[in-house]
Image (cartoon, grey):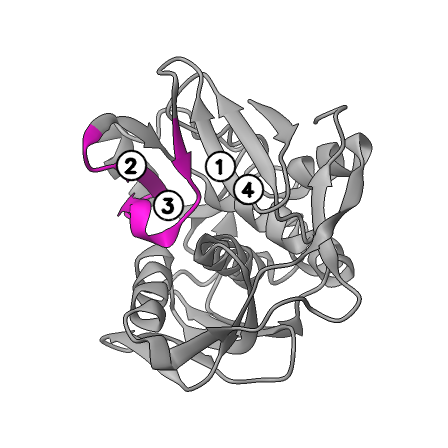
Amino acid sequence: MKLHPAAEGRGVVFRRSDLGAELPARFDYVADTRLCTLLADPAHPELRIGTIEHLLAALAGLQIDNVLVELDGPEVPILDGSAAPFVFLLECAGILEQDAPRPIIEVLRPVRVQAGAAFAELRPAAPGLDLALSIEFPAAAIGTQALALSLNPSTFRRELARARTFALAEEVEQLRQAGLGRGGSLDNAVVVDGARVLNPAGLRMRDEFVRHKLLDVVGDLALAGAAIHARFSGHRSGHALNNRLLQALFADSANWQGTGPAPAAASRAPVPAAA
């Protein structure tokens, strides 16, 4: 993977160099949400890019609006299962302000989607994105956890970036029997077996599980194509509900408006020494 600076207004675009084709990072190109968020072109099924959510979370968390992501295969590297390596590389490359205002989506009225006890919701709020999420798992090592924060580069780095993806031990075996998750290991995921965390070094944070789920929310909401000004709240929300929430938001133009530049904020992109 290579990250290239992009012009003002370009947004986040994925390029498959092996296919000579591009896909925009947009909610209406999401084709699968079972194991990750996966983009695909309906007219060209071979044009697919999976596991985009951690990279998109890093870009959104650092307020980077314009970047070309070049890949020579169908998946963004998982690295350590968090967004921290992407944050490190982007900040090493450098981030610069551009002369165009940031695209912003202001939520005007509540939008909610639900699946059983799980739900995801956006409500009008002051400028910025406030996030609140709770999760509930039968595994004793996870249990019930909740976290709320206001998103900005500082809170993203400190509170969310290092949280790794996780799986239950029984799910890992099921995935492998189905021929999936073949690159997964304790180096890029937290694996839980009942009350035990199987990773030798343990957790990075006591509530790493809900922090990673909130990281996923940030990445999935980035597929709106602009910074969202709203309050997000959810319970047991995953990639599927997060995408359904964006679909519901944009299904009615009365739900939102583009409000132009945020105060004292400009579009940002990596400088040419790309990560």
Badge nearest the viewer, 4 or 3: 4
Residue 96 place in picture, x, y as percent: 79, 42
How far separated are the C-alphas under marks 4 and 2?
Answer: 19 Å
Residue 154 place in picture, x, y as percent: 78, 59
Badge nearest the viewer, 1 or 3: 1
Query: What quarter of the picture does the C terminus occupy?
Result: top right
Residue under pointer 4: 10
Kindly indicate the quadrant of the structure image that contains residue 85. top right
Q: Residue at x 65, y 37 (%)?
A: 86
State which tag comes first along the sequence, 4 or 3.
4
**Which residue type carries mark 3?**
Thr
Task: Estimate how packed mark 2 is, as few (under 14), some (14 to 19) or many (20 or more) residues with alpha carbons within 10 Å.
Answer: many
For label 3, the SS is: loop
For label 1, the SS is: strand
Q: Which mark is residue 37?
A: 3
How far separated are the C-alphas under marks 4 and 1?
Answer: 8 Å
Residue under pointer 2: 40
How far separated are the C-alphas under marks 4 and 3?
Answer: 21 Å
Q: Nearer the viewer, residue 148 or 145?
A: 148
